[in-house]
Amino acid sequence: MRYPILALLCCLLAVLPSKAQVSNHKGVALLVVECEATGGPCNKHHLIRYRFRDGEQVSKDIVVTTSVHRVRFDLGQNHIYLNRYVITEWGDVIDVRTKKVLHDGIGEYVGAEGSRIVQSVERIDIKGIFYYDIESNRYSRLRSPGKWALPGLLSPDQTKSVSVSEWGSNEVWLHTLKRKQKRIASGFRASVSESCCSFPKIPVLWLDNDRILTQKSNGEIVTLRVTGEVEALLKIPVGEPPDILPQLYRNAEGQIVYEHGNEAYVLDVENKKYTPYEWASLGNGFERERGFDKTYGHIFRFQGGEIGRWWACCAKSTNGFVAMEYGDVGSNLGYPKGVKVWNSTNKKWVTIDARWLSTIIGWIVE
């Protein structure tokens, strides 16, 4: 009797979908913001959810509609927290599941941890670090703000931070939880064109809890220890001073990138090498051509293969999906025509035209 039972089990396993097949059938939703203009400029924001299943758009619904005087999604960066909450740059909190604005922020979003969403408030009548608790619906001042009060860029272990002084002196200051601020180095500079800014600031990036990556001058990359020692790392022959500040950051794949205007390089710190950064990572296997062609815009790729050429920007990805704001070739993408969505399930593009598209916030899994 063993063999018939074994044969039956084999048949059952053959018809059951694999783990990969199941994951491909999960529903995802794209969150975007559209404006409504009544007799003039945009005066309302609609947070809209476009649901996708098996690669196809299956529904559209409005999560919340708010006056721009109450909630603004178009100024600064928006964040998705716990696959459920949208947090604006100003600390407004929207629950996508219940379709409610839970909290009207009055400061600047700092971060989130557990059930607390933290914001820094700098107003004439009130200053400090506050939090909104999504479980208790409580808004209160943090009496002991700890790491949230550290200015500048927080270290990986979240016990200290570094900041760069204002007014062009480009001194690097260390801030800790137990001590007052301390100047650890000076003499750095960043050169930019006259159209950029009067007092350009150098870029800084934590490598680990002891070392910071920065520049001595444009293209001259150095490491700086919290104890003040400076070590030369790379000398990249960059072009003329750019119109924007040089930047150091980690991309979606964790690579360290140095941007100098239209030039960009991936830095290999341990081996003291650099390579041109030709394909910008969008995360989840998606890439965008960094170069720009006036006849089509950018090439987009998935897992190394081209998936389309679009006059587009501001892409957001999730597992198997990418969305971007697009327009006609040559148009101003500050006023996009709508959204283009591509997925790896059916390998097709879906076009969502929106007359007053404001911004793409990102994806949630449902």
Image (tube, rainbow, N blue to C red):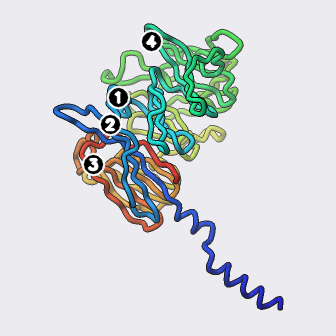
- Structural distance between the alpha carbons of marks 1 and 2: 32 Å
Which residue is the site of mark 3? 354
- The residue at 46%/24% (across/down) is 105
- Structural distance between the alpha carbons of marks 3 and 2: 13 Å
Q: Nearer the viewer, mark 3 or mark 2?
A: 2
Which residue is the site of mark 4? 123
Q: Nearer the viewer, mark 1 or mark 2?
A: 2
Which residue is the site of mark 2? 45
Residue 233 lies in what quarter of the image?
top right
Direction left: furthest residue = 39
Q: Nearer the viewer, residue 166 or 132?
A: 132
Q: Amino acid at mark 1?
A: Asp
Q: Which of marks 4 and 3 precedes in the sequence?
A: 4
Q: Is residue 351 above or below residue 42?
A: below
Q: Amino acid at mark 2?
A: His
10 Å crowding of disc 3: few (<14), some (14-19), many (20+): some
Q: Nearer the viewer, residue 51 or 259?
A: 51
Q: Amino acid at mark 3?
A: Ala
Residue 70 lies in what quarter of the image?
top left
Which residue is the site of mark 1? 243
- Structural distance between the alpha carbons of marks 1 and 3: 32 Å
Q: Badges 3 and 2: C-beta atoms under 8 Å apart?
A: no
Q: Which of marks 3 and 1 precedes in the sequence?
A: 1
- The residue at 41%/16% (across/down) is 199
10 Å crowding of disc 4: few (<14), some (14-19), many (20+): few
Q: Amino acid at mark 4?
A: Arg
Q: Residue 299 at what x, y percent from top left?
A: 37, 55
